[in-house]
Amino acid sequence: MPKKNAFYAQSGGVTAVINASACGVIETARKHKDKIGKVYAGRNGIIGALTEDLIDTTKESAKAISSLRHTPSGAFGSCRYKLKSLDANKREYERLIEIFKAHNIGYFFYNGGGDSADTCYKISQLSEKMGYPVQAIHVPKTVDNDLPITDCCPGFGSVAKYVAVSTLEASFDVASMCKTSTKVFVLEVMGRHAGWIAAAGGLVEEQGIPVVILFPEIEFNQKKFLAKVKAMVKKHGYCSVVVSEGCHYPDGKFLAEQGTRDAFGHAQLGGAAPVVANMIKEAFGYKFHWAVADYLQRAARHIASKTDVDQAYALGKSAVELAIKGHNAVMPTIDRTSDKPFRWKVGVAPLSKVANVEKFMPRKFITADGFGITPKCRAYLSPLIKGEDSPPFKDGLPQYVTLKNVAVPKKLKNFKI
Amino acid sequence: MPKKNAFYAQSGGVTAVINASACGVIETARKHKDKIGKVYAGRNGIIGALTEDLIDTTKESAKAISSLRHTPSGAFGSCRYKLKSLDANKREYERLIEIFKAHNIGYFFYNGGGDSADTCYKISQLSEKMGYPVQAIHVPKTVDNDLPITDCCPGFGSVAKYVAVSTLEASFDVASMCKTSTKVFVLEVMGRHAGWIAAAGGLVEEQGIPVVILFPEIEFNQKKFLAKVKAMVKKHGYCSVVVSEGCHYPDGKFLAEQGTRDAFGHAQLGGAAPVVANMIKEAFGYKFHWAVADYLQRAARHIASKTDVDQAYALGKSAVELAIKGHNAVMPTIDRTSDKPFRWKVGVAPLSKVANVEKFMPRKFITADGFGITPKCRAYLSPLIKGEDSPPFKDGLPQYVTLKNVAVPKKLKNFKI
């Protein structure tokens, strides 16, 4: 029996380092040509598998693949598409098996977050349930840092670094202006359910900067929040607020959903940041500025954490090594063995324990008043933003790679998704 | 007669490199101790002069002053405060003379934008009009890049680099997601009157990225804009929009002023970005993301342009050299002598020709359709973002300096501003 090919796909929101994992997968597979044939990437994630839109990564030079390590975004395209259960949509699984057979695919590497881990887990059961032998390995990726078991998720460390650096820089700015102008700066960051990203803003407190954090894990209390801001401004002359997009009232209503309407009656357009900023202005008259980082935070490869890049690569590499060792239905993990000095190794977790489990900020990571991070949290976060890993620059801009993405000739009929 | 001391102050919105100019002023003054006594900095700009709140920069170590070169924000505090004319508020000018006399100040270095150039020009006339000998030199600074005569303004190159890098990175992100999710990314940038900052987004077009720019210089035409976005998305699958905060309708109404009201009837909270994004969504149903960079763009010293840092320092240095040569009422300028290779030298302009003049984007820098930049504009902008000048990092964060800012003992009575 000829050696099997591998399928690799990127799923969900992309990050600054998901391509570093792709780099780890492809470079490691290339080193084991005796065991693994070609690596086919799905164009736009699992959709590429379903529609037989496969990319032949062997057409890319070693240099191009190596450049993935410093290129943000998903080089093969990503998608938001969750496979239903085998019972609910058998047709899709049958199609995947058809594709795998047609292209001799025996390894399935899926690079994504919680939903993708679930998809990967379903694929891993194909051997048993539908008699097609495929080894499915999940490569963790999510800026939300909400996957269980692993110490952290590739993508998170770089967002955390972006948020910490941005909070630091904007705070220096506000401190300069606060005498006659801006007294409060509000930065809105990602994190619909978990406050890991917002927590990173707290890392600048060690530099004496007053920061108030609004976590999704803590129900928003306007009175307490305003009192906190007032105390900070009274003491320091200014303060910075880092608000998670998922911050909400006790009834579950997001801060961003203030019932704002435009002139045409359309629902509000803004985020949580302008709502929070305006609330402060109404209460105290402080001049404010606000920013919404949005995609900038997760795409900011120029200020990526070296720790994060190294871990992203290592997990891609490990996924291939696990496959070669015969594993199925697993995810390589980051196992932290020491905070100071920071040490970690790669472990492995069964996908059955990863799929559909969300990891929130533990309460002990949040200060008693709910507006800051504790030393425990700092000890956890600090190593994750350590180290810089600047991409190459030319003419003032980072040199990111765009692959050729040559299609594998189709062998099957069209499939409608 | 003993040698005179110098006064230095920072004014208006701070930048990633205004402290590099401060560094140039102070280091150069320290090298000419035979000519210039102490450098006193105004705490919070000109307010520090009026209230006799002076900072003794001689209390700072050479290392601390040298660290200003890589520290964003205004190390001595800035302010938004414009002196009225001599006729309208003679009291303030008399106070300044009192302060200058009390502290033996003969040199006035003012580091700011258009309004500050005006203030500096008024001070420069004190010798003639009020019989107190002081040499006033303006050190240009503004992210808006709208001062005349000088090729560019320190602070602008770094914002331009931030905007270009951010547009590049977010565009890579959207390109990955566009198949099933986000098709349009909107980034709002500064620039109330001039579109220089927004123009920088156009620098990424050379990498094949579809960008639509909305300038304040071009009246907003919704129909044309939507057609442009549609064509871009049709061709590329996605597009990025860079919108200047100053973008407005033919009647002068800003895009950001959409008459949006929150539940309490308060005026809208958002910026131009959500308005533009929603407009596209309404027209075509494209999923969108938007970001507002706000202070992050002007504080982002971590991704500063080396050209910008070098120029900021050079102009601070030159200001002192011009003072020593006996100049008054002038501003050192950047004179570009060649685009490729980029060459520049420091020139000098009379403040009478700088104060109250705004430099807008020339029409020939904007494409015929009004949504992009021309090769002429690219040739102008490209060199300004060139080179990286990373600050030192420790534990994952840039190491910015906070000065001791020791107060000079007061000699005069209080003064109410």
Image (cartoon, coloured by chain):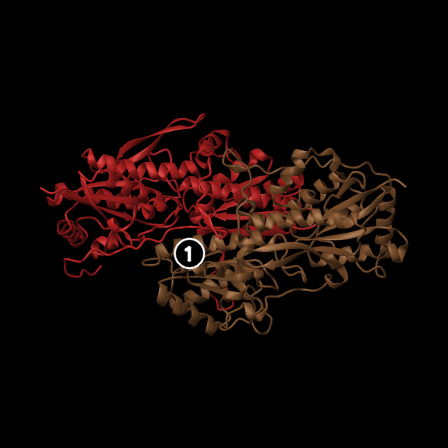
Chain colours: A brown, B red
Name the foreground residue: B93 vs A82: A82
Judging from the image, mark 1 belongs to the subunit labelled A
> In the displayed structure, would residue B24 be above or below residue B182?
above
Quadrant of the image for the N terminus of chain A?
Answer: top right
Q: Residue at x 39, y 70 (%)?
A: A231
Name the foreground residue: B108 vs B123: B108
Q: Residue furthest left?
A: B1
Q: Residue at x 56, y 41 (%)?
A: B168
The count of marks equals 1
Please tell me in which quadrant of the rendered image residue B70 appears.
top left
Look at the numbered disc 1 and give the secondary structure of its residue.
Answer: helix
- Is residue B8 left or right of A306 when viewed as pictured? left
> In the displayed structure, would residue A325 be above or below residue A210?
above
Q: Position of residue B334 (x, y in %)?
A: 34, 33
**Residue A272 makes an appearance in the image:** no
Q: Position of residue B103 (x, y in %)?
A: 15, 50
- Is residue B270 left or right of B74 when viewed as pictured? right
Q: Residue at x 67, y 40 (%)?
A: B234
Q: Residue at x 54, y 53 (%)?
A: A385
**Residue B119 makes an appearance in the image:** yes
- Which amino acid, mark 1? Ser
Q: Which residue is mark 1?
A: A171
Q: Position of residue B309 (x, y in %)?
A: 39, 39
Q: Position of residue B3 (x, y in %)?
A: 14, 42
Q: Dot 1, how many residues are within 10 Å of its Cα: few (below 14), some (14-19), or many (20+)?
A: many
